[in-house]
Image: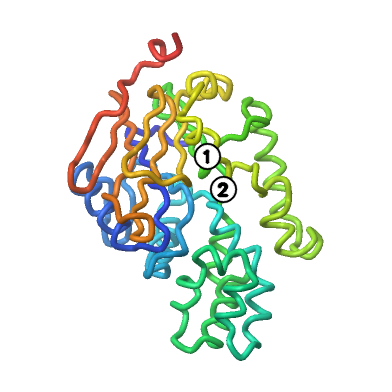
Amino acid sequence: MGAFELVIGIADIHGHYPALDALLKGLQNEYRIFSDPEALKLRPGVHLVQLGDYIDRGKSNLKVLDACMKLAAANPENIDQLFGNHELMALSCLDDAKEAAGEHNPLQRYRRESVHGYNGGMSFIEEFSCVPRTAFDVYVHRMSREGDIGRWMRSLKPFSVVHLGRDKILFVHGGIPRDLRDKELLEQYMTHFVKHMEVATMEAGGPRRKYLNHPLMGDHSVFWDREIPESNGRNAVQIANALGVDYIVIGHTPQKDIANYEGRIFNIDVGMCPTYGAHEPVAIVFKPEGVFAFYVARGEELLAFSGRTQRMK
């Protein structure tokens, strides 16, 4: 764990590379986050967290993934990349993709019969080749455990906790279900998740069971939960305090601007992909003096002042 002076969170890109590119360039101009922009090498003192849903619905999924994998390789000590529900759906449907590859019309089969296909996955798979059968063959290979995308995707985390001075910031894709709103229970969840990911897929009951239908991954998990935004952040202070953190950052539920719940929880999914409205790209930025939204066009906007003692009252 490094001593960070700047912690940045970026949420759901959904295969829309122009948004990610604009954000990284804007953050570089505003904060000089990279020591080597071409290599995407973060400078010392900067920590970046990506909240998942890198793929699906957009038209430049592979460019997004290339950038994410490049970021991971260049910054092993100061980047956290999280699972989103769309990455889990893609992994859970690899058997469906293999079966579809042998069909006369694989795109129709996959769209009709896989949860990934009818939730935006077609735009991702179609990028692998203009020939549908070839696209599925290449997709299955690169998404396998031995493939470049598959290796990277299976390394993603369910959540991360980053320290900035005395403050602790919890980043998670969807939210924290009610049955995990306790510091020790959340730590136990991480232990169970790591063990679950180490189990061979067939031993776990197949990809659908391992990545989608297992209790650690299912509808009421950290990847899918929407209770915090749907309740408009009710009890935000109590939730953060119960988890022993100062701030919680979530994505998964799109809106036009960052949602600020009592200065303790922030939903930063602003629907940057055109499918969700092509809203202005934004990142959340934690600095010693406070919490800020960084909008590509509008610039920096204050979300909350710092001060652990004041917030805990």
Find disc 1 in the rendering and name its residue: 160
In the rendered structure, find residue 169 and report the number of the disc placed on it. none
Residue 82, given in percent of the width and then of the height, sits at 51, 49
Q: Which SS class for mark 2? A: loop
**Looking at the image, residue 105 lies above or below residue 54:** below
Kindly identify the amino acid type of the residue bearing the numbered disc 2: Lys
Secondary structure beneath dot 1 equals strand
Q: How is the image coloured?
A: rainbow
The answer to whether 290 is drawn above or below residue 138 in the figure is: above
Q: Is residue 214 left or right of residue 226?
A: right
Query: Where is residue 133 drawn, in percent x and y?
Result: 56, 87
Q: Nearer the viewer, residue 104 or 186?
A: 104
- Residue 27 in percent (x, y) is at 25, 47
Give coordinates of residue 50: x percent, y percent: 43, 48
Identified at 73% across, 46% down, the residue is 215
In the rendered structure, are the residues bearing label 1 and label 2 in contact, judged by CB atoms less than 8 Å apart?
A: yes
Callout 1 crowding tier (Cα within 10 Å): few <14, some 14–19, many ≥20: some
- Look at the picture and state if 94 lies above or below 53: below
Tell me the quadrant of the picture where the C terminus can be found: top left
Marks 1 and 2, Cα distance to the nearest angstrom? 7 Å
Could you tell me which residue is drawn at 52 percent across and 39 percent down? 160
Judge the density around disc 2: few (<14), some (14-19), many (≥20) Cα neighbours within 10 Å: some
The quarter of the picture where residue 179 lies is top right
> Residue at position x 21%, y 37% from top?
300
Q: Name the residue carrying label 2.
A: 157
Q: How many marks?
A: 2
Residue beneath the point at 48% across and 47% down: 252
Amino acid type of the residue tagged 1 in the rendering: Ser
